[in-house]
Image (cartoon, rainbow, N blue to C red):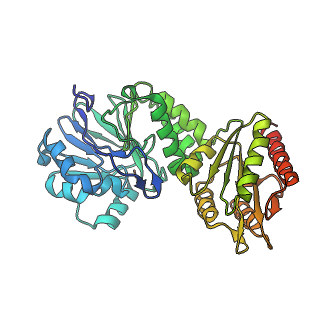
Amino acid sequence: MNENCLSKGINWVGVIDWNIRDFHGYITRRGTTYNSYLILDKKIALVDTVKSSFSKEFLDKIQEITDLEKIDYIIINHVEMDHSSSLPIIAELAKNATIIASQRGKEAIIEHYGENFPIKTVKTGDEIDLGNRRLRFIEAPMLHWPDSMFTYIVEEKILLSNDAFGQHLASAFRFDDEIEENVLMEEAITYYANILMPLGSLVSRKIQEIVKMGISPKIIAPSHGIIWRSNPSKIIQAYLDWSICKSKMKAVVVFDTMWNSTNDMARAITKGLISEGVETKLLKLRSAENTDIITEILTAKAVIVGSPTLNQQMFPSLGSFLTYITGLKPIGKLWSFFGSYGWSRGAVKSMTEIAKRAGFEIINSGLEVKYVPTKDDLKMCFDFGKEIAKKIKS
Ligand code: FEO
């Protein structure tokens, strides 16, 4: 078997996007891959395609293995363009292929690419017989689009999970036992936090549903990054923990600053938290990326957010951060706000209102300091951090 082979006759034919650094706003420092799988049997199936800018490389890779006209099925697990935008190109060349998608997938294919293809719809439990193996489909609506589904290769127990269990991680290697575990898990949690966090209840329900169906995958092959073959239960357990935003005794202090007053407050609050033994991350907006801040928040119990007042409002970077975080809806966190002001207040009030509307649990009325914090003000900030630490520990 070659290095791209999951099992005899099941080949990775994806592409590696080494240089992408911004995936619709998600900072992808390690690039990504678009994974596609070619299954050779009496009938031939291609599962998912790749981003269209890589379509030539993709077609070449498939044609090294088989003629395009021999492909019987093209399975589209998910229509987002990173996986489907090569479909119009390959469907034209793979003249004998029937496209397989969920009902919502069929609608989305038509809405993206027009009514140019023969599409057969499938629902959970439906199977296609390839000859020596069957493909079973499991709809996974809203994980993370309405059309999403998984394809399960029954005989080999391989779950082709599309976006679920993926990572934005470009590598010359394909499998989890070939790369450093800490790098893999760092990218897996970053991916979960930035894409799947608002869908936690659906994630845990889908995993329970799969277990009830008697499916216990030996291999989980997502559509981005590395394939889990050495211990797929590790990523399943991690998803169950992340789906409830399982927290550690940890706080994240996120802030921005104009003339360092809010910076000084943030540092004093952080010292107060640490003095109580709480692991604390201090992250300044415009230096740290939202992508990384959200990942830290996933495993934190408390989030303390600071902004100076500018034009009776929060600083603009806080607006961007709060828009992103309220959309991702982390559950079970304790929230608090602080900031400096000059002649009129506004930042703490406006941030608190946004958090209230999002349904976040706000644990105090916040902390404000006029102009530059005095020694006493900084002591107050330190104590503010200590009080939050006690709440985390209780
Ligand atoms: Fe939802 Fe990787 O696309």
Quarter of the figure with the N terminus: top left
Q: Is residue 174 above or below residue 68?
A: above
**Residue 21: % across, % down:** 40, 52
Indicate left or right for 318 with 29 as reference: right
Q: Quadrant of residue 145?
A: bottom left
Quarter of the figure with the C terminus: top right
Q: Nearer the viewer, residue 42 or 310?
A: 310
Q: Quadrant of residue 251?
A: top right
Q: At x 26% / y 66%, what residue is drawn?
A: 115
Q: At x 66% / y 66%, what residue is drawn?
A: 315
Indicate left or right for 382 with 279 as reference: right
**Residue 350: % across, % down:** 73, 67
**Residue 242: % across, % down:** 58, 40
Indicate left or right for 296 with 107 as reference: right
Q: Nearer the viewer, residue 276 or 54?
A: 276
Which residue sits furthest right?
376
Residue 86 visible in this rendered orientation of the protein: no
Q: Nearer the viewer, residue 314 or 111?
A: 314
**Residue 75: % across, % down:** 29, 48
Q: At x 23% / y 30%, what residue is drawn?
A: 132
Q: At x 33% / y 65%, what residue is drawn?
A: 112
Residue 326 visible in this rendered orientation of the protein: yes
* Callout count: 0
Q: Quadrant of residue 179?
A: top left
